Amino acid sequence: EVQLVESGGGLVQAGGSLRLSCAASGFTFDDYVIGWFRQAPGKEREGVSCIGSSDGRTYYVDSVKGQFTISRDNAKNTVYLQMNSLKPEDTAVYYCAARTVRAGCSFGWYEYDYWGQGTQVTVSS
């Protein structure tokens, strides 16, 4: 059974940090790129970051460049999203998703094959 399980969300004050984890199972992790998405209430799901597999290339939406860092540990089948200098506008449910390496990274949420259940991130002002 394919599973992506996010963890690490929570409530943090503005300026604080969180590290999200996405643990994968049930598929060949190395064959997939992993993206992070977020969805705030009343807003569309937004691509935040993506990381390749063997090449480790990383991509960020402009609004989080220099603030978020994505990384992966293929030995642990886990991808991380380090979020620093958090702002109230970063409040959202954060999801990780998997897409084949052949297809490559994308910020289009509809292009991903597998999804986690999401983890809530709330940033208070």
Image (cartoon, helix red, strand yellow):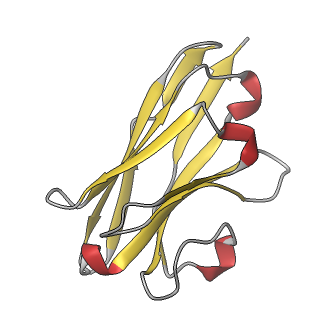
Q: Residue furthest left?
A: 75
Where is 100 relative to 35, above or below?
below
Where is 106 relative to 9, above or below?
below
Between 8 and 36, the one lying in front of the other is: 36
The residue positioned 70% from the left and 22% from the top of the image is 87
Between 59 and 82, the one lying in front of the other is: 59
The residue positioned 61% from the left and 32% from the top of the image is 66
Which quadrant does the N terminus fall into?
bottom left
Where is 120 relative to 24, above or below?
above
The residue positioned 36% from the left and 57% from the top of the image is 5
Count of numbered marks:
0
Q: Within the image, what quadrant is residue 86 found in?
A: top right
Q: Within the image, what quadrant is residue 98 found in?
A: bottom left
- 75 vs 20, left or right, is left
Query: Where does residue 56 sit, x and y in percent of width and height?
Result: 37, 61
Query: Where does residue 72 sit, x and y in percent of width and height?
Result: 32, 53
The residue positioned 29% from the left and 64% from the top of the image is 24
Where is 40 relative to 17, above or below?
below
Q: Residue furthest bottom?
A: 102
- 50 vs 24, left or right, is right
Query: Where does residue 90 sit, x and y in percent of width and height?
Result: 69, 33
Which quadrant does the C terminus fall into?
top right
